[in-house]
Amino acid sequence: MSTYADRLSQLRARLTDVGKQLSSLADRRKSFSLAAATGDATARKQIADTDAEAEALRREEQTISAAVETAVALDKQQELEAQAAEEHARQVDAHRHAQGVIALNLEIDAALVHLREMFERRAVLLAGLARTNIVDGLFVGRLAGKAGPTLEPPSPQSVRPLADTNTILVGIGAPPEAESPPAPRLGRKRKEGSDQ
């Protein structure tokens, strides 16, 4: 409810009340009119008092009518200001969300660049793995052929993380810190039982 709603209600009630009083005074004036027209001083005094009271009520009626118009205009202005404030709050909220989307777009773009670079490094490593001729070329081809990232979610049956093949990859080759096998010795074989 607006600030002016209660005041408007009171003013309109008073305006109705003043209208009733003016109607009552008009009836009273009419009741004294015949006597006043025939020269009755008391009736003339009553009519004069009634006219003065009616004039005061008409001025009050004009004032109240003007007050009602002003209150209606102020009420409308207050409603427009409330709507403007609500619209501004929605605009601020929309701006905040848009800024969040912008920030995430930048993060996603950077992550996609990083992801592309990781896939490129992976392709180089897979090519290097294939060149070692230690691993079956079909297997490397299958690893290289695994689909890259997509924005569309794949079907649940085809979703297999790249790391699924890690258990196979971990056993390929020898880590650099592993002991190297003993080098074959060049020289003559010693005969058993020989001291030489």
Image: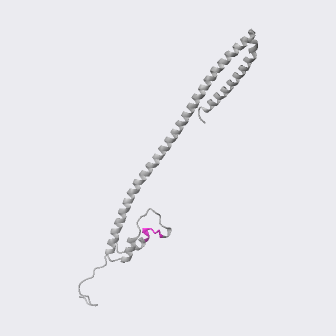
Q: Residue at x 41, y 74 (%)?
A: 168
Task: Answer left or right for 16 relative to 158.
Answer: right
Image quadrant for the C terminus? Answer: bottom left
Task: Answer left or right for 129 relative to 158.
Answer: left
Looking at the image, can residue 176 be seen? no
143 above or below 4?
A: below
Color style of the picture: one colour
- Which stretch did the figure color magenta? 158-164
Q: Residue at x 48, y 44 (%)?
A: 91
Residue 6 rendering spot, x and y as whole percentages: 63, 31
Residue 161 rendering spot, x and y as whole percentages: 44, 68
120 above or below 67?
A: below
Q: Residue at x 47, y 70 (%)?
A: 158
Res 54 quadrant in image: top right
**Is residue 162 covered in magenta?**
yes
**Is residue 135 covered in magenta?**
no
